[in-house]
Image (cartoon, helix red, strand yellow):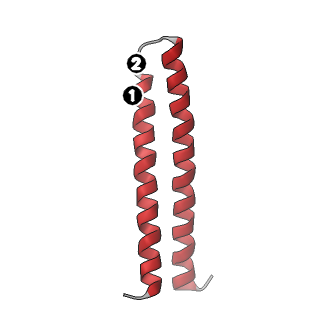
Amino acid sequence: MTTDTQELDQLQTEYKTAVEAWIAAIREEEALASGDHSIAEVDKWEAAHFREEKARDKAKEAKSAYEDAIREKFFGF
């Protein structure tokens, strides 16, 4: 296995891990949206939303890094 392939494998794994974390954050937010209508629950729901946004940003960054590495390997840019 070449170093290039190992790097791509690692970036792909990081992307998949980030997506799984994002999915978990979405599910957490969704579960809280289905709760009762108290102020405390709304606060938890809002906090979960911010965690979801952070997880989404990490997934997008990991995807971009993976795509950039693929472009570099196959197209040289």
Q: Residue 41: image x %, image y %?
A: 48, 18
What residue do we see at 51% from left, 15% from top?
Answer: 40
Above or below, comparing residue 49 to residue 15 in the picture: above
**Residue type, mark 1 in image:** Ala
Distance of label 1 from label 2 (alpha carbons): 7 Å
Q: Quadrant of residue 30?
A: top left
- Report the front residue among 64 and 25: 25
Which numbered marker is on residue 53? none
The residue positioned 54% from the left and 76% from the top of the image is 69
Dot 2: what SS? loop
What residue is drawn where x is 55% and y is 21%? 43
| Callout 1–callout 2 Cβ contact below 8 Å | yes
Q: Which amino acid type is shown beneath numbered disc 2?
A: Gly
Mark 1 surroundings within 10 Å by alpha-carbon count, few (fewer than 14), some (14 through 19), many (20 or more): few
Q: Position of residue 5 (x, y in %)?
A: 42, 82
Q: Work out whether residue 51 or residue 30 is closer to the camera in this orientation and state it.
A: 51
Q: Residue lying furthest left in this view?
A: 1
Rendering coords of residue 19 (x, y %): 44, 53
Q: Position of residue 49 (x, y in %)?
A: 53, 33
Badge 2 crowding class, 10 Å Cα cut-off, few under 14, some 14 to 19, many 20 or more, is: few
Looking at the picture, does residue 51 appear above or below residue 74?
above
Who's the residue at 51% across and 84% down the image? 74
**Left or right: residue 77 compared with residue 45:** right
User: Where's the C terminus, which quadrant?
Assistant: bottom right
Residue at label 2? 35
Numbered badge on residue 31: 1
Q: Farthest residue toward the top?
A: 38
